[in-house]
Image (cartoon, grey):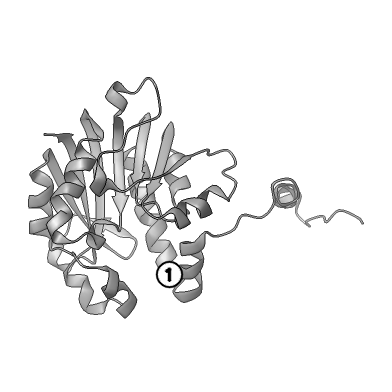
Amino acid sequence: MPRKKTREPQYQETITIAETQGLARFGLMSNQVWHDDPRRLVFLLSRYKFVAKMLSGKKRVLELGCADAFGSRVVRQEVESLLCTDFDPVFIEDAKSRPQGPWPMEFRVHDILEGPVRSSDPDAPQGRFDAAYTLDVIEHIEAEHERTFVSNLAKSLTPQGVLIVGMPSLESQAWASPASKEGHVNCMSGGPFRTLLEDFFHNVFLFSMNDEMVHTGFSPMAHYLIGLCVGPK
């Protein structure tokens, strides 16, 4: 059967990649988002891009709560190595089942409430990471466990380590879907969110986010909050 040819030669690479590497597919969670509300995928990937640019060049990076790790490749593109973790084996198995191509990542099941995460890199100082991030996870943690959550993340980092925490704001929940509200048991406003992070890090920088736009605006009007934390205490 004759090979397909694109009318413009610069696009022939699209056929070559499809034939040699196959077509990429969504993971379990990104697939559900694509079916239910495709715009949310734009918001998701923009958060990963923010993380990627903030952590660019870091050697050992940890993601906590990666789900299907669909967006993780955006971060891996900017860092030397990435360990993706989730407490649900279903999502880790799904992430492992999809080829990583030129962006290899490590996957591991881990519950952060049970303890810090340690790097498998033998050169990592005390097994700690240079940076970590967790997006859309802390709002699923009961308030009584939130300090354990942040503490164990801080203990996973080197003394100069960086942590990025992203979560929907408390104010956004008036417009959240019933399914989101069921899982969002601990959304916060900007002030309490910053205070929590400051208990575990020397420096905390708070960003607001509306749709795919990250900014430094008035946090009560933000749909999403991002805490950039530096230097575990």
Q: Is residue 13 left or right of residue 72?
A: right
Q: Quadrant of residue 202?
A: top left
Above or below — where is 220 with respect to 66? below
Q: Is residue 126 left or right of residue 84?
A: left
Q: Measured from the top left, where is residue 227 in percent x and y?
A: 20, 49
What residue appears at the point 35 percent right and 39 percent down from the top-left corner?
A: 62
Asked if one can make out residue 68 in the rendered structure from this viewpoint, the answer is no
Residue tagged 1: 39
What residue appears at the point 13 percent right and 47 percent down from the top-left corner?
A: 197
Quadrant of the image for the C terminus?
top left
What residue appears at the point 60 percent right and 41 percent down from the top-left corner?
A: 101
Q: Measured from the top left, where is residue 224 in percent x and y?
A: 24, 62
Above or below — where is 17 with respect to 45? above
Per the image, label 1 sits on a secondary structure element best described as helix
Q: Measured from the top left, where is residue 196 in percent x and y?
A: 10, 51
Q: Quadrant of residue 44?
A: bottom left
Q: Quadrant of residue 221?
A: bottom left
Q: Amino acid at mark 1?
A: Arg
Label 1: few (<14), some or many (≥20) within 10 Å? few
Quadrant of the image for the N terminus?
bottom right
Q: Measured from the top left, where is residue 14 in percent x and y?
A: 70, 51
Asked if one can make out residue 109 in the rendered structure from this viewpoint, the answer is yes
Q: Is residue 107 left or right of residue 116?
A: right
Residue that extends furthest to the front in the rendered view of this protein: 114
Q: Is residue 171 left or right of residue 61?
A: left
73 and 120: which one is in front? 120
What residue appears at the point 46 percent right and 63 percent down from the top-left corner?
A: 29
Residue that extends furthest to the top in the rendered view of this protein: 123
26 and 65: which one is in front? 65
Q: How many marks?
A: 1
